[in-house]
Image (cartoon, grey):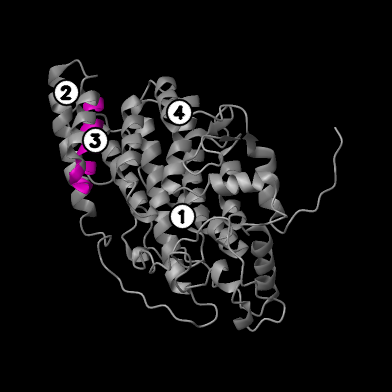
Amino acid sequence: MTWVARKFPRSWSVLIVSIFGGVLFGGCGGDASVAELHQDERVRAQANPVIVDWIVHTQDVSGANSPPRRSRTFAMVSVAMHDAVNGIESKYARYASSARDHKASPVAAAAQAAHDVLLALFPAQQADLDGKLVISLAAVGDEDAKVRGIALGQAAAADLLSARANDGANVVVSYTSTLQPGDWRPTPPAFAPALEPGWGNVTPWGLQSGSQFRSRAPYALSSAEYTADFIEVRDYGSATSTVRSADQTSYAHFWYEPSAVGWNRLARTALAIRPKNIWKTARMFALMNMALADGYIASFDSKYTWRSWRPITFIPGADTDGNPDTAPDPSWTPLRPTPPIPDQTSGHAVAGFAAHAALVQAFGDDPGEPMTMTSTTAVPAGSTRSWATFTQAAAENADSRVMVGIHVRQSVLDGEKQGRLVGAYVVHHRLRPLDD
């Protein structure tokens, strides 16, 4: 093999992991639909189809939610299912419910719990959710166990909904932007108001508070570090970049979808490779979604503490930053639109590395064979990417935010650190095995 010297950007450490771990399969299954991949997951993971099915149903009904609210929905559904099955046989500590019935069907309990949580959150979807529940319950042949499972699932859902009823998710917080250099302000093309400015105050699932792992402040506008970050995202994140590679462009689009969607799909993909029983499956999804949801809470605490501006603001407006080493480019635009939230830290990087901790705990870093999947934002549609390890996927996910032009390198690196801390804390403190 001949090695060719290449000049890597300052993000070399992340990119090398991505290059060797995130291979683009342009012609292998590129026309596979998301629905087909869902079906493949179910076929290959027969040990636990009910958990997988209701995670997929959660994705289907929660699409109108903002990314942090969607993460909360996934956490609520997966934790309710975990609590329900552990009310039959107590293998792991539960989050909210103490209801028990040793004769209940775990399939019925999990399905009913998920159904009831989603129905409480999305009452307009009742007909669809009721139909999905009928399908799940039809798999239970023992009528007495089914009835007991339904009752147990209802209790687990009610306890979970009660525990999260006053978690602050519905508290409206106002936000006033400024035109001060360095401060976030609404961004084109929509110029939407700040998204979920109070989300950092939502009660965490596993952390002690949203500020527990608050990030450091953004670099000073006059610093060499700020200048380097400015140049990197300007050059690599532009819609018309001439230095971003085809592979970098691919994963920039691929990981653009909401974190809860992508990481739950990756978890299902790993589960299809290494199926687990219903208790282990329920715990894996519950821990991962608790960590991911707490990642958003922690990231939004940092975002609205530091209020840092986005590349779409500071690159065209560089004449206001007081830095002689940055030059404005009025025509600059990112590869894809910028979400209406401050920069520091990258919620994608935080959520990805928080989810990574739970997946590594469940599978090890390498589940045994490459994990291949598509994305709702993949270009071309239906194209797939593959990773040998969760670390490779998380690194590529984080780097994508610079490549797509919506975050600077500091918010990605600090987001990785924050996500690792969040994930490790949740995994080591919540839903512990009862025989520890």
Q: Counting other residues with Cα less than 10 Å from the Cα at mark 1, is it few (<14), some (14-19), or many (20 or more)? A: many
Q: Residue at point 58% right, 60% down?
A: 334
Badge 2 marks a residue whose secondary structure is helix
Earlier-in-chain disc, 3 versus 1:
3
Real-space Cα separation, disc 4 to disc 2, in angstroms: 29 Å
Q: Which residue is mark 1?
A: 422
Residue type indicated by callout 4: Leu
Badge 3 marks a residue whose secondary structure is helix
Say the numbered circle drawn on residue 146: 2
Real-space Cα separation, disc 2 to disc 3, in angstroms: 13 Å
Could you say where residue 256 lies in the image, as x and y percent from the top left? Answer: 51, 49
Q: Residue at point 22% right, 19% down?
A: 140
Could you say where residue 318 lies in the image, as x and y percent from the top left? Answer: 62, 77
Earlier-in-chain disc, 1 versus 4:
4
Find out whether residue 116 is within the magenta segment: yes
Residue span colored magenta: 106-124
Q: Which residue is mark 4?
A: 37
Q: Which residue is mark 3?
A: 84
Earlier-in-chain disc, 2 versus 1:
2
Residue type indicated by callout 1: Val
Q: Main secondary structure of the magenta part?
A: helix
